[in-house]
Amino acid sequence: MLVKFYLNDVEVSFDVAPNEYLAKTLRSHGIKSVKVGCNESSCGSCTLLIDGKPMMSCSILSASIEGKHITTIEGIQEEAAKIAHYFGEEGADQCGFCNVGLALTVYALKRELKNPSEEEINNYIVGNLCRCSGLQSQLKAIKAYLKEE
């Protein structure tokens, strides 16, 4: 079946199987930044933005995104560089596997919540796990990024 949507603000159409998940669709079309860690929506590595909201692409059927706006890290390069800078400053870039999904979540957080508390930040990023550092250094980096105008 043919599904049409916007990928990083460019209209695309892909032929997908009815049971195909978005992570697989994107990876098969060259978007390798979308990682699949657990394949059951538990780790957040496959997070991308659907209409501006963080979603786990390993559990979204490609057929369900007709007309939606999908944003991957390639679509927010300038902001991703800023987030990466703060991650690096805080030593929050250990193996890097979770960073892309977390960066997209943090980007959405900054756009949605103004001056969030630490509890609000933790609640927002709860779906993104880091097996290397337990998110403490990431939390420091996120707070620094959110202070930036």
Image (cartoon, grey):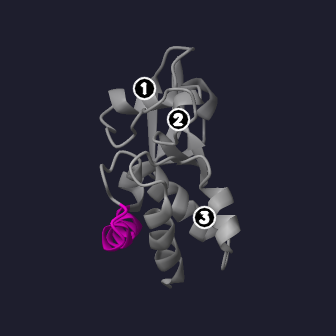
Cα–Cα span, label 2 and label 1: 8 Å
Amino acid residing under circle 2? Ser
Q: Residue at x 48, y 83 (%)?
A: 148
Seen in the picture, residue 20 relative to 143 is either above or below; the reply is: above
The boundaries of the magenta stretch are 77-92
Q: Which mark is residue 109?
A: 3
Q: Which residue is mark 2?
A: 57
Amino acid residing under circle 3? Leu
Q: Which residue is mark 1?
A: 24
**Image-based side of 35 in relation to 55, left or right:** left
Cα–Cα span, label 2 and label 3: 18 Å
- Expressed as whole percent of the image width and height from the top left, the position of residue 74 reads 36, 53
Q: Residue at x 49, y 63 (%)?
A: 136
Secondary element type, mark 1: helix
Secondary element type, mark 2: helix
* Label 3 CA crowd tier, 10 Å (few <14, some 14–19, many 20+): many
Between disc 2 and disc 1, whose residue precedes? 1
- Expressed as whole percent of the image width and height from the top left, the position of residue 128 reads 53, 48
* Label 2 CA crowd tier, 10 Å (few <14, some 14–19, many 20+): many
Between disc 1 and disc 3, whose residue precedes? 1
